[in-house]
Image (cartoon, helix red, strand yellow):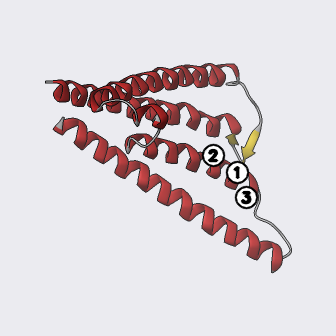
Amino acid sequence: MGILHQIKTYFKKIVIAFLMIILAEMILLSFGQIIARKVFLDSIPSADQILTMSVMFMALLAAILTTLRDKHISIEMISNFVSVKVNLWMNVIANIASFIITLYLVFAAKDYLAMNSDSVEIFYGEIKTITLEASLFYGFLAMAFAFLINSIESIFLAIRKVD
C-alpha cells in the first residue's frame, strides 16, 4: 500500500503542475489577446483555438486529479443504507468498472488517432490538429492508470476490513 500511495502522490503532483502551467498559459494568452484586440486592433493568431484546446486539457487533467483523489464516483443513495463492508466492495466494483470503461476510451482514442493520422488540418505553423488531439489518448491512459491504482487500493482496503 505504501508504494501505491507514493505513486499516487507523485502522479498528483505531476497533474497539478500541468494544471498550473495550463492555467497560467490561459491567463497570459487571454490577457494578451485582450490587449492585442483593444490596443493594437489585431489579434494573436490561433489564440482562440489554443484557449479552446487548453480548456479541454484542463478538464481532462481535472478529471484525472479527481480520480486520483478518489472523488470521482459514488452511489450515495445506496451507500447510506448498507454496511461499511458492502460500501467498500461497491467502491471496488465502481473502480474496476471505471477502469474498464476508461480503458475502452483509451482504445477508442487510439482508433480515432489512427483513422485521422493523415489529417492535413494545420493548427498553427507546422503543428497539425491531430498532434493536439493525441493528448486525448494520453489523458485517457493516465485516467485508466489512476483508476487501476484506485482499484488495487480499494481491493486491499476491502480485504483488510473484512478480516
- 3 vs 1, front mark: 1
Which three-letter amino acid code belongs to the residue tagged 2? Answer: Met
Asked which secondary structure carries label 1, the reply is: helix
Q: Quadrant of the N terminus?
A: top left
Few, some or many residues within 10 Å of mark 3 (<14, 14–19, 20+): some
Q: Quadrant of residue 147?
A: top left
Q: Is residue 112 visible?
A: yes
Few, some or many residues within 10 Å of mark 1 (<14, 14–19, 20+): few
- 3 vs 2, front mark: 2
Q: Which residue is mark 2?
A: 56
- Identify the mark at residue 52; answer none if there is no mark: 1
Residue 54 coordinates in the image, percent (x, y): 62, 51
Circles 2 and 1, Cβ within 8 Å, touching? The answer is yes
Which three-letter amino acid code belongs to the residue tagged 3? Answer: Ala
Mark nearer the N terminus (3 vs 2): 3
Q: Is residue 73 visible?
A: no
Q: From this viewpoint, which residue is outermost toward the bottom? A: 39
Q: Which residue is mark 3?
A: 47
